[in-house]
Amino acid sequence: VYSDSDTYLLDDPLSAVDSHVGKHIFDNVIGPTGVLSKKTRVLVTHGVTFLPKVDMIVVLKAGEISEVGTFKELLARKGEFADFLVQHITATEESELEPDIEELMEDNPELKIQVQRQLSSSGSVRSRSSHGRRGSMESVGGLSVGRKDSVKAPLPVDKLIQIEKTETGSVKLKVYASYLGSFGLFLTVSTITSQILAQVFSVGSNLWLSKWTSDETAVVDGVEDEPIRNYYLEIYAAFGLCQLVATWASSFSLAFGSIYASRGLHISMLYSILRAPMSFFDTTPTGRIVNRFGKDIDVVDNTLPGNLSSAMNCFILVGGTLVVITYSTPVFAAVIIPIGLLYYVVQRFYITTSRQLKRIESVSRSPIYSHFSETVTGASSIRAYKVERRFVKTSEDRVDINQMCLYPSMVSNRWLGIRLETVGNLLIFFAALFSVLGRDSLDAGIVGLSISYALQITSMMNYAVRMSSEIETNIVSVERIQEYADVPQEAAWRVEPRPQPQWPEKGMVQFEDYRVRYREGLDLVLRGIDFTVNGGEKIGIVGRTGAGKSSLTLSLFRILEAAGGHIYIDGLDISKIGLGDLRSKLTIIPQDPVLFSGCLRMNLDPFEMYNDSDLWYALDLAHLGLFIRSQPEKLFHPISEGGDNLSVGQRQLVCLARALLRKTQILILDEATAAIDLETDDLIQQTIRREFQNCTVLTIAHRLNTIMDSDRVVVLDKGMIKEFDSPAKLLKSNDSTFYSMAKDAGLV
């Protein structure tokens, strides 16, 4: 509305709101008296309540336009639209017809005759349930939960999206312990030991080579003594072979240890995220989670093992070098400690800044992932509103911020390099100085070896300090992974003793002084709910937007945990059993169908508990069998991410087939057929009534005509039960909330 466009394309926006809100939106926004009355509006809808007020109706059939005209013109033609309207009217008792349709029936005797013939052929007036028990809960039960209308009522105490946490100071020892614990004790010891042995054999071979060059007996009268040469050569080869084996063992241990560590950390974080409560996902943008599973896991997979290997190799090599230099010129030991302290001071000064810069850079990367995810999801809307440039600019700005955080890290790295080169040159200077000063008493071969080692020590020391800094910088990724591995968890999946396999047999549901809130610090959204649903009863749940209908369903699945009171199913307190046992005994057909990328069979039966004949039977009952049989892959028909290669109605039918396959004693309908045409809707309702006739059915509804055949109706208002009785009794009282809602819907 705020875009102030000339043309508005409205894809069934009124199906997810109750009749009162829908009427308000149409009258004040979409309709002939609304704020968009001077604009061109194309409204797609399955309902007929507002059709008399539109300027023109386009009727589609099999992807083609079958009729075009005004409401009265189409009725007069007695074509597709008239048939469609007759079907809708015959699915509703005359006493509940919208006033506009009643008036049109009076003005069109032929239409009235057609309706009466249709009613006579069916034997009796169909109940309103042929329209479906369709509900309003703006969330999806089971595996995924969307937005929650009840959260909007009170002013929040804190922000919904929390600022991403950034640690400060040195990385805690428990982070290193976590990584090494995932690495494994045996592989950790094996890696370090084999690295040390490889360096010992390397230094040993060089010392042996120095001894060989200094042995005057190896050459007699200019001729090399062959036995002595072979002796030295065999020992030298043995050193080389042992170094090769030790290096191979070190690489092997490090590779396997790194794989185990990475896999262990990934599994730990994955399981923790999958078992996190919904409040975590409400307050955490997707980009932050993707950042942890993307960049941080990549660092643990590819960067950290290389840092560890290089750091260990360098430190052990530096240690060997200092031993050789000290062995050749013992006085050199006097300068090792001061220079070592100088290295330590430079390294600690650098790492304090570098570590925090790494944390800041990691945090600045999350908004890039979040924005990218939001852009991909809303690509069609972005193109429709022609705001591509704004989204590109936002993306560039977030990348610039990330680069602003990355650049100081690179600059600090160069700062470190200059200072390490300076300190390294001091080592070379003192090694050469002491060799020259003690040239009369030192062995030439050993001195040459110590000088050659000293020339390498600058790069080795630089690399060692740099790698130790890189380890402490990149171990931040382990710290961030561990943070998500330690998020609060839902209740236990299995609790002993477990309920009997046949539980629940009756499907009786009892709420006892039940109270719930979405998160700590927020107001209660259900306030002392008390009511009982007998086994096999069909209950309608209605209320204005924000009344707490979604909260009631979320509480049944324990997606929201009680702040007080209890829920009993067949006399068993659901808070005393595991979430796996509870959720496996409940089925929901959601308003927003949830499908996963893969194949149809996986979406219907993810745990492979049913055979193909069971799946085909469920698909036939859901009126999807014909479509699936027409596909080349049949049950293995590919499903894209989110089920985007299926229409919304087909996705809903897949969810219905899934529910028919499970056939639990308690079924929750959440506006289950809102996106389906009336003819299919009627067939589906017949299937639900037949297949779940002995089950307890809770129908959360916006449109009251979908629950008028319920045994009883719960009317919620501001998180409390305002009325609870049969629809007929509630309609008898002109002062009841239910009567007021029915009047708004044009049912009385």
Image (cartoon, rainbow, N blue to C red):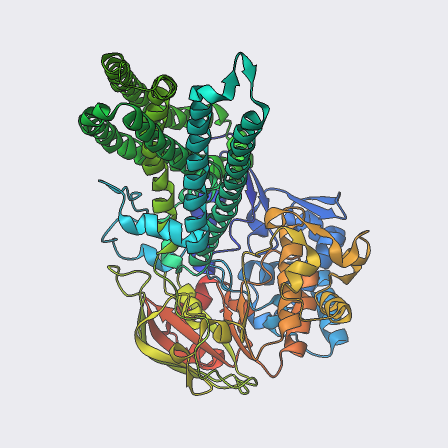
Q: Is residue 699 left or right of residue 511?
A: right
Q: Can residue 720 be seen in this view?
A: yes
Identity of the residue drawn at 31% across and 36% down: 359
Q: Is residue 123 above or below residue 465?
A: below
Q: Is residue 462 above or below residue 311?
A: above
Tell me the quarter of the image containing the N terminus. Answer: top left
Q: Position of residue 53 (x, y in %)?
A: 55, 48
Q: Is residue 156 left or right of residue 392?
A: left
Q: Is residue 711 left or right of residue 108?
A: left
Identity of the residue drawn at 47% across and 81% down: 726
Is 608 or 600 nearer to us in this picture?
608
Give residue 228's quadrant in the image. Answer: top right
Q: Residue furthest front?
A: 221
Q: Can residue 37 be seen in this view?
A: no
Give residue 394's quadrant in the image. Answer: top left
Q: In this view, does 630 lie to the left or right of 227?
A: right
Q: Is residue 370 above or below residue 427?
A: below
